[in-house]
Image (cartoon, rainbow, N blue to C red):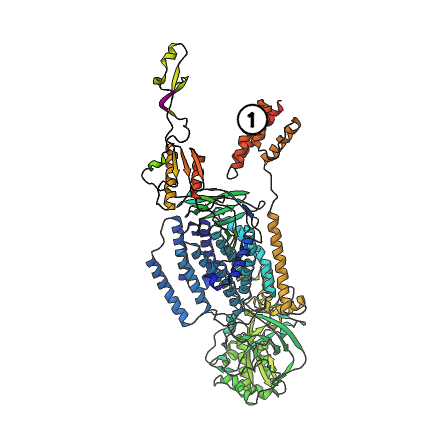
């Protein structure tokens, strides 16, 4: 709408000016270049009362009522400074962000540092579409707060400029600032359950055998320790006077799984990624090693949280660019 | 409804305190039921806050609004007056108390509270009222702030903040007050639908003035510019009575047309000054009348005042508030008639009082001219008459009864009788009502005239001199015009009988205290309430010349200065970063390791450093690892934690002991 009325060049220059004012970086300090201040609705009412008192005083030739009008005007002017000082000097830094799945809320942790021993009260942090948090710094030099942002799309989530606002102390003025805090997180695809894995996922004989304990082939002896199954004791060596030895077996590691981009031909990309996500989570839980084959990347089969994170991240950014979060 | 928009406990408590404080001084001005409504709704809200009651159902609220609001609206429909408007505001915010759940409701109530607090000053402009209203403003601002401050600041947090803001705002207010130009009234709303004040009335029955002698209210104050007149010169003329009927003196409407603005009686040759003049100013208390007291013949006066052909002055409208005016009067003068016919009404007498008429004929025969006739009458008064505030009642022929029977009375009786006797001798005469004398303030800077200084005297028309003042009371009791009424009346039993502490009134220290308070009040009056009269002069002295550019600069410079002061104050609150104790102790420990050959590399964490040291000195390993643990816990704790800090300090101490044992 706005673009249709306002010339594009002007809009762009305004946007540039705004983003210049917002600043950029993982840690930003609020100063007079970034803080905007304006009367709130309550403030306009307050000014209205002051004007009314002036008129009332004029009309009744009553200097005292007029003086009250002047007092309210002065209070308003003084409050501008108080409201400004409540925000100024405050430093906001990004601490960490937690990845999440589509449909959940990503949590962003922020750290607020007070300006050299000053108090900052009732600071409201919010994203236009996200959650809000109220923080008060009274006597503390810093404080952490977590802001949530709904994740609606897989990929890298950058919540955009953060609005930080304060109406302290009287609520008649609102000081605010937009901070372009550099902060982002990865949103994983939403897991989607789907029966069993197609057979093509099992790749026999491919890859090296994992060293998992099993009971297929004898692999040697090791000293018996309490807790081992008594059935594994090699009584022959015991009879030879070589102490208690337990027999070791190894299972043939043929069951690692490849999660392949082409497992479910014909399904659309998002469903496919959701199913792969589901299986990655499930296989990891079942302790079945798995690998990932995507058009751009290939992750060797493995297990563990780090592996899972790498796989989920690869699924999240598949086809949407890979700039680092 | 988001939780952050709900009202906190301190906000609610401050709101209730503010509402009650604001309504309290209006007890005298507004109907009692309205204040009961306020008490009830506040009480109800308190019970809701305690969790004992719930908010009233919407039907109850509707009934309350309709049942209480309609009568008020009907009253306003009959005619808008200030007290009905204030009633409406008070009703509105009392009922709103019953539905304060959210910020917006609270804000509305507080804005109305500001207006109601200010309206108190329309009814009462005394200093006490002003300080009370200032206190109310502080509490309302506190309540406003409490809405926007976190509830953990408690009750005192918002109060401290708003007190600070108001303190900083006061100097700015003074600047605005001094410099902002005043405008004339834009429209008028009657102050009160019913208000009665004591003062002179437009009719005089002989008893009226004795009613005023019971009253110590201040009538007006006067300040003389150069010469201070004698007590006996101070005849403050307020009105004249030319008609006499059934024992009552009065003045019919239209008997004395008002002259146009900017025209005085000297301009149309009704009077001429013979030299001696007095310049003075008067601060009149609200009288709800247009009459303004003035000495003798006022020659020049403020533009909005008009003069009547009997030389008295009228304000443009009834005085609802204190009113200050400046004027100059001629004390020696000669007056001329408007026309010969205009004097005829001052000769008219109703029938009756035969004995007095006979006496008049007898005295006319004995005396050659008017002046000796009057002198004879006054001598008569002087010889056998008694001055008293409690005279006996008079019968049908009141003048006869007074002159021949009771011979006891006060100014009303004497002046009435004298005018009767003058008219009976064909000398035009009238009664003048006003005030006589007054009390000088102890420092002599101004004169205070109270209602008990009310007086009546006589003016007689002598063809060669015009209107001449005669005071028959002075002939009976000369001290009445030579000393203040208070001293004069003291032994009269009825004097100030209406005052609750009449006995105390005369105590010395109390009198002194009263004078001091009055002096403060007078300054307050001159400098604050009537500042607009002095503004021009003050600004001219301050700025040299008053024009808009200079005014804007004069406004901006103090403002900028004040803002700078506040800015500086805020910056001063910033303290340099204080390094915690453990940090300093850790630094000390690390520097004590340097001589032993262990120094921390650039970018090395404390843990890495500790491990490196522990490799060389295994006997320190335990303590060093624990130190690194403590340090990490401290560094990564979300908030300041005193327990972690003290653990760190203890661990540092153990490390120092260990190193010392080497």
Q: Is residue B363 above or below residue B142?
A: below
Chain under label 1? B
Residue B572 as seen in the image, left or right of residue B148: right
Q: Residue at x 52, y 47 (%)?
A: A182
Left or right, A98 with reference to A201: right
Answer above or below: position of B448 versus A230.
Answer: below
Pinpoint residue A214: horizontal percent, then vertical percent.
Answer: 36, 24
Circle 1: is it few (<14), some (14-19), or many (20+) Cα within 10 Å?
some
Residue depicted at x 52% and y 67%: A55
Whether residue B418 is visible = no
Q: Name above or below for residue B442 compared with residue A143.
A: below
Q: Quadrant of the C terminus of chain B?
A: top right
Number of numbered discs = 1
Q: Secondary structure at mark 1?
A: helix
Judge whether residue A180 is colored magenta.
no
In this rendering, is residue B422 above or below B410? below
Extreme-bottom residue of the structure: B340
Residue B196 x/y as whole percent: 47, 70
Residue occupying the far left of the picture = A195
As rendered, which of A26 and B205 lies closer to the eye? Answer: A26
The magenta stretch is A214-218
Q: Main secondary structure of the magenta part?
A: strand
* Along the line of sight, the residue nearer the viewer: A87 or B436: A87
Q: Position of residue A241 (x, y in %)?
A: 40, 9
The part of the image, by quadrant, that contains residue A212 is top left
**Residue at the front extreme of this rendering:** A205
Which corner quadrant of the image does residue B108 belong to? bottom left
Please name the residue that numbered disc 1 is placed on: B623
Give coordinates of residue B388: x percent, y percent. 54, 71
Q: Nearer the viewer, residue B135 or A246?
A: A246
């Amino acid at each position: 709408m706005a673009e249709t009325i306002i010339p594009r060049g002007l809009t762009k220059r305004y946007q540039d000016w705004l983003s210049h004012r917002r600043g950029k970086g993982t840690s930003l300090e609020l100063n007079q270049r970034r803080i905007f201040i304006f009367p709130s609705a309550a403030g306009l009412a307050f000014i209205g009362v002051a004007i009314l008192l002036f008129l009332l005083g004029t009309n009744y030739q009553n200097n005292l009522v007029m003086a009250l009008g002047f007092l309210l005007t002065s209070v308003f002017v003084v409050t501008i400074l108080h409201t400004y000082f409540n925000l100024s000097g405050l430093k906001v830094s990004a601490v960490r962000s937690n990845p999440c799945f589509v449909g959940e809320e990503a949590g962003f942790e922020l750290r607020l540092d007070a300006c050299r021993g000053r108090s900052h009260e009732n600071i409201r942090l919010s994203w236009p579409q996200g959650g809000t948090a109220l923080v008060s710094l009274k006597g503390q030099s810093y404080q952490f707060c977590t802001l949530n942002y709904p994740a609606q799309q897989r990929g890298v989530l950058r919540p955009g400029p953060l609005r930080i606002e304060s109406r302290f102390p009287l609520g008649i003025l609102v000081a605010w600032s937009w901070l372009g805090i550099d902060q982002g997180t990865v949103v994983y695809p939403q897991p989607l359950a789907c029966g069993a894995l197609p057979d093509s996922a099992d790749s026999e004989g491919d890859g090296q055998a994992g060293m998992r304990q099993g009971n297929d082939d004898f692999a040697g002896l090791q000293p018996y320790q309490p807790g081992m199954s008594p059935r594994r004791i090699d009584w022959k060596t015991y009879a030879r006077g070589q102490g208690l030895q337990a027999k070791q077996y190894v299972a043939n590691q043929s069951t690692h799984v490849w999660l392949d981009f082409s497992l479910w031909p014909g399904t659309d990309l998002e469903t496919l990624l959701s199913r792969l996500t589901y299986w990655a989570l499930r296989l990891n839980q079942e302790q079945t090693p798995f690998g990932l084959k995507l058009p751009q990347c290939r992750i060797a089969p493995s297990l563990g949280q780090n592996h899972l994170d790498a796989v989920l991240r690869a699924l999240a950014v598949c086809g949407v660019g890979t700039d680092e979060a | 409804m988001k939780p952050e928009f709900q009202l906190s406990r301190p906000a609610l408590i401050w709101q209730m305190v503010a509402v009650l404080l604001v309504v309290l001084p209006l007890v005298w001005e507004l109907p009692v039921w309205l204040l009961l409504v306020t008490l009830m709704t506040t009480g109800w809200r308190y019970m809701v806050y305690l969790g004992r009651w719930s908010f009233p159902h919407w039907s109850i609220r509707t009934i309350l609004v309709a049942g209480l609001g309609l009568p008020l609206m009907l009253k306003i429909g009959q005619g808008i007056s200030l007290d009905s408007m204030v009633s409406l505001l008070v009703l509105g915010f009392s009922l709103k108390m019953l539905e304060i759940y959210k910020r917006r409701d609270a804000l509305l109530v507080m804005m109305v509270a500001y207006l109601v607090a200010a309206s108190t000053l329309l009814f009462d402009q005394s200093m006490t009222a002003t300080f009370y209203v200032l206190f109310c403003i502080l509490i309302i601002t506190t309540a406003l702030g409490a809405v926007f401050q976190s509830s953990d600041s408690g009750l005192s947090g918002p109060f401290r903040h708003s007190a600070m803001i108001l303190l900083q705002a006061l100097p700015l207010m003074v600047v605005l007050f001094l410099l902002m130009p005043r405008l004339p009234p834009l429209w008028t709303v009657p102050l009160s639908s019913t208000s009665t004040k004591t003062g002179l009335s437009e009719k005089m029955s002989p008893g009226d003035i004795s009613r005023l002698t019971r009253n110590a209210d201040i009538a007006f104050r006067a300040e003389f510019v150069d010469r201070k007149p004698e007590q006996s010169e101070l005849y403050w003329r307020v009105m004249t009575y030319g008609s006499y009927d059934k024992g009552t003196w009065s003045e019919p409407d239209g008997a004395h047309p008002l002259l146009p603005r900017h025209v005085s009686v000297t301009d149309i040759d009704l009077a001429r000054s013979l030299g001696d003049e007095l310049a003075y100013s008067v601060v009149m208390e609200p009288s709800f009348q247009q009459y303004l007291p003035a000495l003798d013949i006022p020659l020049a006066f403020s533009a909005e005042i008009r003069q009547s052909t009997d030389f008295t002055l009228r304000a443009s409208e009834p005085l609802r508030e204190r009113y200050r005016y400046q004027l100059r009067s001629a004390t020696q003068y000669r007056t001329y008639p408007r026309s010969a016919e205009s004097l005829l009404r001052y000769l008219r007498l109703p029938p009756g009082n035969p004995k007095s008429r006979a006496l008049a004929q007898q005295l006319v025969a004995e005396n050659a001219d008017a002046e000796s006739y009057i002198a004879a009458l006054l001598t008569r008064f002087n010889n056998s008459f008694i001055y008293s505030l409690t005279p006996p009642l008079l019968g049908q022929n009141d003048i006869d009864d007074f002159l021949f029977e009771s011979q006891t009375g006060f100014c009303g009786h004497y002046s009435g009788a004298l005018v009767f006797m003058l008219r009976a001798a064909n000398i035009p005469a009238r009664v003048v009502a006003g005030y006589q004398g007054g009390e000088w303030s102890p420092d002599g800077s101004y004169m205070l005239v109270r209602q008990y200084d009310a007086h009546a005297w006589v003016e007689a028309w002598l063809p060669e001199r015009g209107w001449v003042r005669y005071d028959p009371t002075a002939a009976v009791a000369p001290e009445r015009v030579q000393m203040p009424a208070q001293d004069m009346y003291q032994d009269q039993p009825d004097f100030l009988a209406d005052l609750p502490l009449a006995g105390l009134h005369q105590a010395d220290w109390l009198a002194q205290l009263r004078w001091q308070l009055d002096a403060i009040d007078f300054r307050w009056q001159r400098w604050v309430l009537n500042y607009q009269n002095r503004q021009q002069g003050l600004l001219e002295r301050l700025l040299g010349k008053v024009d808009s550019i200079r005014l804007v600069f004069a406004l901006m410079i103090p403002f900028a200065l004040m803002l700078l002061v506040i800015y500086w104050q805020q910056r001063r609150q910033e303290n340099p970063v204080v390094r915690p104790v453990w940090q300093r102790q850790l630094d000390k420990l690390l520097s004590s390791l340097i001589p032993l050959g262990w120094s921390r590399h650039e970018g090395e964490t404390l843990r890495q450093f500790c491990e490196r040291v522990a490799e060389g000195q295994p006997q320190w390993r335990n303590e060093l690892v624990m130190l690194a643990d403590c340090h990490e816990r401290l560094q990564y704790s979300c908030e300041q934690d005193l327990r972690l800090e003290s653990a760190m300090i203890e661990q540092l101490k153990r490390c120092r002991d260990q190193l010392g044992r080497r």
